Amino acid sequence: MASKPGPFTEWPWHKLGSFKYVILAPFVGCSFYTYCIGKGEKDLQNMMSIPLLLVWRWLHNQIWISLARFQTARSKHRILHRSIEFDQVDRESNWDDQILLSGIVLYLSKMVVPGATNLSLWRTDGVVFIILLHGGPVEFLYYWAHRALHHHFLYSRYHSHHHSSVVTEPITAVIHPFAEMVLYFMLFTIPQLTAVLMGTASISAIFGYFTYIDFMNNMGHCNFELVPKLLFSMCPPLKYLMYTPSYHSLHHTQFRTNYCLFMPFYDYIYGTMDKSSDALYEASLKGTKEAPHVVHLTHPTTLYSIYHLRLGIASLASKPYAFQLYYSWMLWPISSGFMLLTWIFGSTFTVERNRLHKLTMQTWAIPRYSFQYLLSCQRDIINSLIEKAILEAEEAGVKVISLGLLNQGEELNGYGELYLTKHPKLNIRIVDGTSLAVAIVLYSIPKGTERVLLRGIVSKTGYAIALTLCQRGVKIITVCSDEYEKLKLCLPAKNRCCLLHTNVYNTAEAWLVGDGLKDQEQRMAPRGTHFIPFSQFPPKRLRRDCVYHTNPAMVIPPALENMHACENWLPRRVMSASRVAGIVHALEGWDTHECGHEILDVEKVWDAALRHGFLPLVHK
């Protein structure tokens, strides 16, 4: 929002939220009715052109979003070394409003503008005409309109909303108040409307012009330099006809320079070209290689979790992952296709880059889904991918790598011990976060609790929790004989008196749950039960009268930068225990591994996490 919002700042369909596309329904219905029932020549090509254009524009923009986020997580060619936070993602979540507006404008044009229907597929004279009109009137008028919007009166009421984002992403390009976007649409309509009225317009020209605008807008707002120097060496005049991301980035940091739309020609003419433009371009192209200190190794969970990754749909990634979206069925072909591609060709990829003071972190993802980790035929492949990631991190000088989600499974790799066995001289430290997970679960148990029910597949973390509770005199109740026998074997004889076996579920108000908790078991819990998971995945929330905790996690300190995506189902600015453990391990400079059956001192790790600003997550 602008600092002093002016008239027509809000978009008219703002209150409709995700249902805003229903506004197009009357136009689509009218177009379809006219084609089926109306008299005159029926033109399927023209009827389908607008819906196809809108879909293409959404897809084109989304490709740029994913590409830019992928590159800023790993590229050395970043322009601004600053962070993006959740407030910017929220502010830019309506980036598709301009696509909706373009659909309305196009449908209205077909209805009222003579010659806007039955367009030919291609006309060379129309294409040339649009190019000339864009380079002349559109660029000229935009330049002066943009300078006017930087006058304090208009800037405070409109354009300051766009400049709230200093570090830009591709979608920043179209984040404007409604009135300002209408002004831009009026400018971009000049070439298209003129071509239509002169009878030279074509479907290809309109598609091409919208694609050109989207391409240049998205490219210019990337926070990394991607325009090769060779391009300007081969064609020197191109420097005046095409801006670069670093060129426009200076406009967002200096405010009073580099006003042009896409062509710096007008900045050169009117003396508003920033003198450091060339130097920043050269520096960004050269880049600075920055190896992370910590790497967290994760993987996608369900087929639809790819949209929730930071590289996916920004608005979804900024919210805790909902396991089943109401429109998931529409995305099924894309999700399945992506899964097959990663299965066949995939390699580990960088998802995120963060910083805590001088400590740099990256999150890498193994291109396998949760269900693939359960397939015996995939174990060797997954282990080879994890091993390769560890060795790449070792070569890059990474200090600590933490194994997240199923990358630390007992059956898969013995909680990571497999990699130490194969590479005993590793300098990098492998951390599974067990000690911190134990500490978080122990903290989550309500004070004064004398007995807890332990249910689900008991992992390394579960055994450690059971041992600690028994040492504190807390009764551990199990309802499964197998779990009881396994726990009995691993507990010292003096602590086994705290381990009880029963068939009754309502004997404890705190349930420590691992994977495998059944729905009917949840329903047998007494009212007010605390479900506290010690596994990597939280239980399904079936009861409104119970308290559900997340899987072991902590709130991150305010100083941790570039957090604008949620980690799976966790709330904003909350990290899983395994991820936090890797950071704390590096901050403390500990020289030991925590994997296999090795567990660090629980109190020591907990105190270190609190000392570095990580806080326990409060559940209500």
Image (cartoon, helix red, strand yellow):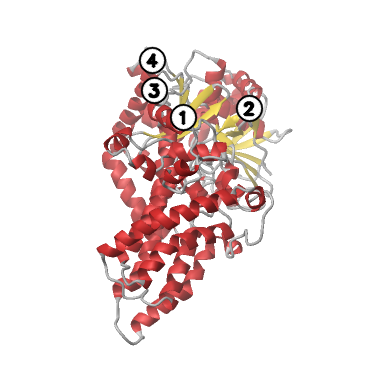
Residue designated by label 3: 393
Query: In the depicted view, which residue is nearer to us: 284 or 263?
Result: 263
Q: Residues within 10 Å of mark 3 (few under 14, many from 20)?
A: many
Please state which of the two labelled residues, at mark 1 or mark 2, is closer to the viewer.
Answer: 1
N-terminal label among 4 and 2: 4
Q: Is residue 20 above or below residue 259?
A: below
Say the numbered circle drawn on residue 426: 4
Cα distance in 3D space between marks 1 and 2: 35 Å
Q: Earlier in the sequence, mark 1 or mark 4?
A: 1
Q: Position of residue 561 (x, y in %)?
A: 57, 32
Asked if residue 150 is positioned above or below residue 119 in the image, the reply reads above
**Can you tell which quarter of the image residue 138 is in?**
bottom left
- Could you tell me how far apart the alpha carbons at marks 1 and 3 are, in whole angstroms? 10 Å
- Determine the secondary structure under disc 3: helix
The earlier-in-sequence mark between 1 and 2 is: 1
From the viewer's side, name the closer residue of 469 and 132: 132
Say what secondary structure mark 4 lies in. loop
> Type of residue at label 1?
Gln
Q: Residue at x 34, y 68 (%)?
A: 49
Could you tell me the amino acid type at mark 2? Leu
Residue 451 horizontal side relative to residue 370, left or right: right
Q: Nearer the viewer, mark 1 or mark 4?
A: 1
> Label 3 amino acid?
Ala
Count the numbered circles shown. Answer: 4
Tag nearer the camera, 2 or 3: 3
Query: Distance from label 4 to label 2 (Cα)?
Result: 34 Å
